[in-house]
Amino acid sequence: MYFPFLDESPEFRRDVLDALRQPLESGSVQVARAHGAVRFPARFQLVLAANPCPCGLLVGKGERCRCSVVARRSYLARLSGPLMDRIDVQLQVRAVTKAALAGPPGEGSAAVATRVLEARERQRRRWHGRPWRLNAQAPGAVLRGIELRLPSEATKPLEIQLDRGQLTLRGYDRCLRLAWTLADLRGETRPGPPHVLEALGLRTAQAA
């Protein structure tokens, strides 16, 4: 799997960014010409980064930013709703402070890598005998099906957002996949309400 990283993603043309929607959804790219069409595998994990505004200074109180309101909206509007609907984790990252620098060190990469490998092994066992190996590859209909359906108290926040039009069915399914992965990372058998709430929070750009 490839991990393309687009820094300053709103600097790309909107049509270029939107061209990523179909391969993100299907894991393949289809090239059509007059004499036929060819489909190529294109499963990848996309990472986008963006400043809060064109000058990048809209942080904290934003006193140093000189961008107009129109410029800010136009800048972020290049990341279309349909594209963002396919991004599972969306985070607003605060500026680093002196207090943060003085805090305890984060978890080491080796420990994180071990936990990820263990989570992937749980997923491999879960999907053994099926066409998928990872939660990210499982269709939403399967995650919502009888065998893997989560209790109503766990999915209620998703259903409320869905009824309000604040979450699409695609977003609902992606939250389920993320909730299963969060449970796997914590060594738990099935997601519960905390995992679903965390998945929903990660999707709605809670600050980190």
Image (tube, helix red, strand yellow):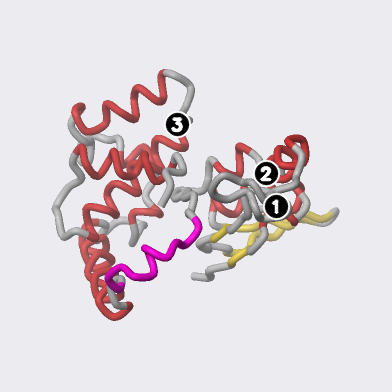
Q: Which residues are magenta?
A: 95-105
> Dot 2: what SS?
helix
Label 2 or label 3, whichever lies nearer to me, is 2
Query: Please, what is the three-letter code of the amino acid marked with disc 3?
Result: Leu
126 relative to 118, above or below: above
- Per the image, the residue denoted by label 3 is 169
Marking on residue 175: none
Q: CA distance from mark 2 to mark 1?
A: 6 Å
Give 86 or 143, whichever is nearer the viewer.
Answer: 86
Q: Are marks 2 and 1 in contact (CB under 8 Å)?
A: yes
User: In the rendering, at what x and y percent does residue 208 appear?
Assistant: 40, 52
Q: What is the three-letter code of the residue carrying label 2? A: Leu
How crowded pointer 1 is (Cα within 10 Å; few <14, some 14-19, many 20+) is rated as many
Q: Is residue 96 magenta?
A: yes
Three-letter code, disc 1: Pro
- The residue singled out by tag 1 in the image is 10
Q: CA distance from mark 3 to mark 1?
A: 26 Å
Residue 164 position in % (x across, y down):
44, 19
SS at circle 1: helix
Tag 3's secondary structure?
helix
Separation (CA) of disc 2 from disc 3: 23 Å
Query: What residue sits right under mark 2 in the picture?
Result: 76
Above or below: residue 199 compared with residue 104: above
Residues at circles 2 and 3 in contact by the CB criterion of under 8 Å: no
Q: Is residue 147 above or below residue 188?
A: above
